[in-house]
Image (cartoon, grey):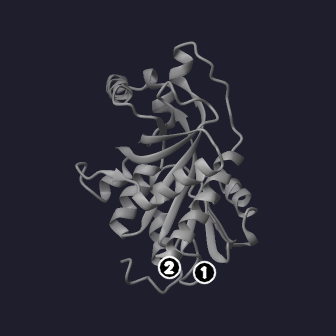
Amino acid sequence: MAKEILGNEQFHIKLKKGDVGRYVLLPGDPKRAKLISQYFDNPVEVSNNREYAIYNGYLDGELVTVCSTGIGGPSTAIAVEELANIGAHTFIRVGTCGGMDLDVEAGDLVIATGAIRMDGTSREYAPMEFPAVSNFEVCSSIIEGAKKLKLKHHVGVVQSKDSFYGQHSPETKPVYYELQNKWNAWLRLGCLASEMESSTLFTVASYRKVKAGALFLCINNQERQKQGLSNELFEDVDLVIKAGIEALKIQIKKDKCD
């Protein structure tokens, strides 16, 4: 299917080969896509359909793209599939998360080396034994970017889920026992944070032979709240946007030197 529609307009994003850059930033919120585009040189909106708000611009002379994905795995998979069909080869997720490890405070950045596959979409791409991991080069560029900007960050595994309220009010769900037992297991294993897209992104990227990484702004940490620790809501996404832009610049430079 992917090969058959390679040169045609993609069904959801309404773009064709040559309409996007090879490097793409992936926020969830369409409004955040517009914010990110303001960091590009000569930004221009190229498509806006459903949850997919797409802008092009330039970073250090390279054509780059930002595409919103909406919330969760299904729409993220569509975006990556269709963007890969028309020439994109490097993706960086720029999102938000809820902290899990007690060391992860609101306002910190979390950089995912891999993701726990609690989503449903990735199961239609790979058996559960297959790991959802970030591309080493891209992950390294994200870490370099965070260090260069002197931003507090954590590097490790995150949990990807499909149900926001399954995390935040599991006791109301018929399968509470399963949700809580698995959550406690992730905590014991040192999982840093919970979000909703990276396991799908990493799995689809592996299948499509493209590169992907992910970073998140921690907006709060329910585990810190349970322990009576400081946990003020932090929603200034400018921090994670700047880190994503810097990471993309670093990756572009690396690729040009190869």
Percent across and percent down for residue 60 are 67, 73
For the residues bearing labels 2 and 1, Cβ distance under 8 angstroms:
yes
Task: Please state if 166 lies on the left or on the right of 53 as rendered.
Answer: left
Q: How crowded is mark 2: few (under 14 residues within 10 Å), some or many (20 or more)?
A: many
The residue most toward the bottom is 7
Residue 187 point in image, percent of width and height:
39, 27
Q: Where is residue 76 in the image (x, y as percent from the top left)?
A: 49, 58
Q: What type is the residue that disc 1 sits on? A: Asp
Residue of label 1: 19
User: If you read the primary sequence from the N terminus, does the residue marked by circle 2 or circle 1 appear first?
Assistant: 1
Q: What amino acid type is highlighted by mark number 2?
A: Ile
Q: Residue at x 45, y 50 (%)?
A: 198
Give the structural element (helix, strand or loop) at label 2: loop
Judge whether residue 155 can be spotted in this image.
Answer: yes
Residue 197 is marked as none
Residue placed most toward the observer, 63 or 51:
63
Quadrant placement of the N terminus: bottom left
Measure the alpha-carbon separation of dots 2 and 1.
Answer: 8 Å
**Residue drawn at point x = 41 percent, y = 48 percent:** 113
Report which residue position mark 2 lands on. 86
Q: Which residue lies furthest to the top in this view?
A: 228
Q: Position of residue 239 (x, y in %)?
A: 68, 46
The image quadrant that residue 65 belongs to is bottom right
